[in-house]
Amino acid sequence: MQQRISEIITEICGLEADDFTPDLDLFEAGFLDSFGTLQLLVKLSEEFGVELDPGDIAREEVSCVERIAATISKKKGSA
């Protein structure tokens, strides 16, 4: 799952896979802003079949690949 999340982030942010690590805070690094976050949530929702409503997701839950994977796993578990 983390590999696919990383691929989606590279697509949305225009990065290379070598530009970040699974624990890098994408906001602090300047890779994600509010518009990028919306794009990311939409793509992740489609890809993993979970509801990731921007109003219900805290910034910390999508700040790095590891946290995104945990958020998706949690959502899948509650579905």
Image (tube, helix red, strand yellow):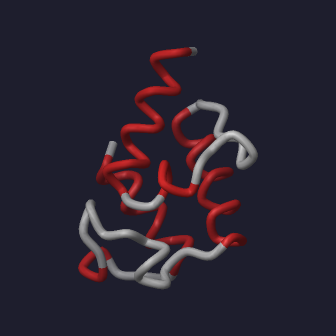
Q: Quadrant of the C terminus?
A: top right
**Can you give x and y, in whole percent of width and height, for residue 78 in the image?**
53, 15
**Can you give x and y, in whole percent of width and height, for residue 40 in the image?**
60, 59
User: Along the horizontal axis of the image, is 21 left or right of 47?
Assistant: left
Name above or below for residue 73 compared with residue 36: above
Name above or below for residue 44 compared with residue 59: above
Of residues 40 and 64, which is closer to you in this image?
64
**Can you give x and y, in whole percent of width and height, for residue 76 in the image?**
49, 23
Q: What residue lies at 64% left-to-right and 71% top-to-bottom?
A: 36
Q: What residue lies at 63% left-to-right and 41% top-to-bottom?
A: 46
Name above or below for residue 59 compared with residue 30: above
User: Along the horizontal axis of the image, is 43 left or right of 9?
Assistant: right
Q: Quadrant of the N terminus?
A: top left
Of residues 15 and 71, which is closer to you in this image?
71
Q: What residue lies at 27% left-to-right and 61% top-to-bottom?
A: 22
Of residues 2 and 47, which is closer to you in this image?
2
**Can you give x and y, in whole percent of width and height, for residue 33 in the image?**
62, 76
